[in-house]
């Protein structure tokens, strides 16, 4: 899945549009980004769907236009550039054109269905805006880069199981969700309870992307209508309020050797943590539930050779990985529900083991293996549907020390490899395909920091919509970079200093902040960075220095060292951090 820049591909001045919007700038702008004070780059719509219903014999659907607006005070010269990945969009004939000092029009042309074939196809467009140079190699305008999701259905592919992702959001805050199912092409209205969606796009007959307004806490049934009657859809959205989770320091029932997985159910307010021991057959899933303002330890479940865990999108199943099998547990009781053994995990490579899991919105879980001496593979495991038996396909491909992550909306699973720099790999839940993101190449930093250690460390982390990714990379030294939806670097956060080194990191659900946990001798702290305005590749984002930051976690640090497996999660409102390491678990309320 090659990433192509409309500028470099077409070589046309129309594709990188520049217009003088006033030569003054300044104001109260940060020093790293002069000339963009108070400006915001807004693109609408952000979701586009094309359908060629009669297979490859259909004519090419007409192009669609998207409007981009720069709000706020006039800045300097305006530049805009498109970067397009995927196979749905005709890169050579798609363009961006400046209409006036504050508006641009993006023309998106789909590829001929004849050249694609029957199935689902997708592209991601990042629209970059700046006041610096035609390539926008420096600081960007706030809100840039903007992401446009493009789906293209050719013929009538097999529909996915019904799903909603994310199925939980924050009360009193507008949000986006992805609906999967069938019969969506005819949908003319989407409602959350009795409230209509702010906006929605039928991306295809099997996917809708919708925005709901700020609503009160509660569970809202989602209803779809075609204008002549309802369209079947049985999922509900639950909105949870901010400020309800108690800060705490949680002890493991038995001190583990390492942490092996972290998940949180915001509805039942239950935290799940995998605990690995020196005798792996004793490994456990530990859970804590907030009741009457206090975190209560539930009876743990022994899962021999546990490696990782994840909740299904509907939170009905806790999917765990062992060395060679997939075991589903009930989230309420931690009782085993089903066991599936993927084929050829360690037949060819004796020391291989299952390692990474990302649940996607097509009813699958993208599962990877790894090996300290050889390469890993991936499988697709059917999470949706009856409890058992589950289907699993694979193994596929070959990866070096892979780590996987994905956004809460389940649209993709992203794989970053250790060793030498290699292209980022991405599984697309709409197309069901995995491909390389070129030219972005990343070498994962200290994927195996200690000889023989193979636990998950430095996973790619995302906001809930998948517009930003943070990952630790290596290029002669460690660096922590934030990337856009097409994996172009936007800026960096520190990897450490003379006193402490990054042990874990996360991005807030709304993609406004990045958080890093730093551990050193006598030091354990959480630092925050404002990632709303990209400073440019290699440049550092502004640190948040409001009262309460950095957060001092000493002496009760979750991790004994920076290179032990440690994870950070945020709740849907983004006001609470869950940090789990090899020593303990911290529930930390964010300042403000």
Image (spheres, rainbow, N blue to C red):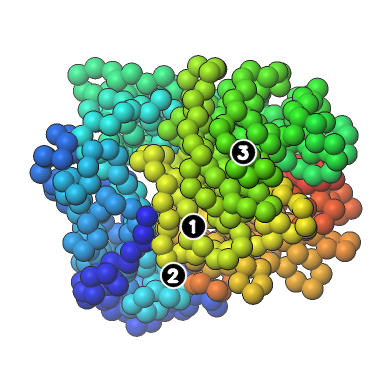
Indicate which disc residue 272 carries.
none
Kindly state the secondary structure of the residue where label 3 is placed.
Answer: loop
Q: CA distance from mark 1 to mark 2?
A: 23 Å
Residue 545 visible at all: yes
Q: Would you say 100 lies left or right of 443 here?
A: left
| Percent x, y of residue 97 | 22, 67
Q: Nearer the viewer, residue 323 or 559?
A: 323
- Residue drawn at (26%, 43%), measured in percent from left and top? 152
Q: Quadrant of residue 445?
A: bottom right
Indicate which disc residue 347 carries.
3
Q: Earlier in the sequence, mark 1 or mark 2?
A: 2
Q: Are marks 3 and 2 in contact (CB under 8 Å)?
A: no
Q: Would you say 196 lies left or right of 35 here?
A: left
Indicate which disc residue 424 carries.
1
Q: Which residue is mark 2?
A: 140
Badge 2: residue crowd in 10 Å (few <14, some 14–19, many ≥20): many
Kindly state the secondary structure of the residue where label 1 is placed.
Answer: strand
| Percent x, y of residue 468 | 50, 55
Where is 146 relative to 168, above or below? Answer: below
Residue 466 visible at all: no
Q: Would you say 136 lies left or right of 477 here?
A: left
């Amino acid at each position: 899945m090659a990433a192509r820049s409309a500028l470099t591909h077409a070589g046309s001045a129309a594709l990188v549009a520049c217009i003088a919007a006033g030569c003054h700038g300044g104001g109260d702008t940060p020093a790293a980004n002069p000339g963009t004070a108070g400006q915001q780059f807004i693109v609408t719509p952000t979701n586009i769907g094309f359908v060629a219903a009669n297979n490859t014999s259909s004519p090419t659907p007409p192009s669609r236009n998207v409007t981009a607006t720069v709000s706020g005070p006039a800045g300097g010269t305006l530049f805009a550039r498109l970067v397009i990945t995927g196979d749905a969009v005709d890169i050579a004939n798609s363009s961006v054109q400046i209409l006036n000092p504050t508006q641009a029009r993006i023309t998106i042309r789909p590829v001929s269905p004849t050249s694609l074939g029957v199935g689902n196809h997708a592209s991601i467009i990042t629209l970059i805006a700046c006041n610096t140079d035609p390539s926008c190699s420096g600081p960007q305008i706030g809100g840039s880069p903007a992401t446009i999701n493009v789906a293209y259905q050719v013929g009538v592919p097999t529909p996915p199981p019904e799903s909603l992702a994310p199925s939980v959001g924050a009360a009193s805050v507008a949000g986006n969700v992805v609906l999967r199912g069938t019969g969506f092409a005819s949908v003319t209205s989407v409602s959350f309870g009795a409230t209509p969606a702010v906006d929605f796009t039928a991306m295809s007959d099997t996917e809708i992307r919708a925005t709901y307004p700020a609503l009160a806490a509660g569970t809202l049934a989602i209803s779809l209508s075609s204008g002549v009657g309802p369209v079947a859809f049985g999922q509900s959205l639950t909105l949870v309020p901010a400020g309800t989770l108690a800060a705490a320091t949680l002890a493991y029932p038995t001190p583990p050797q390492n942490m092996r997985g972290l998940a949180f159910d915001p509805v039942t307010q239950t935290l799940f943590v995998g605990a690995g021991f020196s005798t792996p057959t004793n490994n456990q899933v530990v859970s804590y539930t907030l009741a009457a303002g206090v975190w209560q330890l539930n009876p743990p479940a022994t899962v021999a050779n546990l490696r990782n865990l994840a909740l299904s999108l509907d939170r009905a199943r806790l999917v765990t990985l062992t060395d060679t099998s997939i075991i589903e547990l009930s989230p309420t009781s931690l009782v085993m529900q089903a066991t599936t053994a993927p084929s050829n995990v360690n037949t060819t490579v004796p020391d291989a083991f299952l390692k990474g899991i990302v649940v996607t919105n097509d009813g699958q879980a993208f599962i990877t293996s790894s090996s300290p001496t050889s390469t890993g593979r991936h499988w697709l495991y059917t999470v949706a549907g009856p409890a058992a038996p589950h289907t699993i396909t694979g193994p596929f491909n070959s990866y070096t020390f892979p780590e996987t992550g994905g956004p809460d909306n389940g649209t993709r699973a992203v794989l970053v490899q250790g060793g030498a720099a290699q292209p980022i790999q991405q599984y697309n839940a709409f197309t069901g395909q995995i491909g390389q993101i070129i030219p972005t190449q990343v070498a994962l930093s200290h994927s195996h920091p200690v000889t023989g250690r193979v636990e998950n460390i430095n996973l790619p982390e995302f906001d809930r919509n998948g517009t930003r990714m943070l990952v630790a990379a290596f290029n002669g030294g460690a660096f922590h970079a934030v990337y856009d939806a097409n994996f172009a670097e936007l800026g960096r956060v520190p990897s450490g200093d003379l006193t402490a080194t990054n042990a874990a990191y996360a991005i807030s659900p709304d993609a406004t902040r990045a958080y890093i946990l730093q551990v050193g001798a006598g030091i354990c702290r959480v630092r925050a960075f404002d990632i709303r305005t990209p400073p440019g590749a290699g440049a550092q984002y502004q640190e948040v220095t409001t009262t309460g930051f950095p957060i001092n976690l000493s002496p009760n640090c979750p991790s004994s060292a920076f290179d032990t497996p440690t994870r950070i999660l945020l709740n849907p409102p983004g006001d609470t951090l869950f940090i789990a390491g090899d020593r303990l678990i911290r529930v930390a309320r964010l300042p403000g």
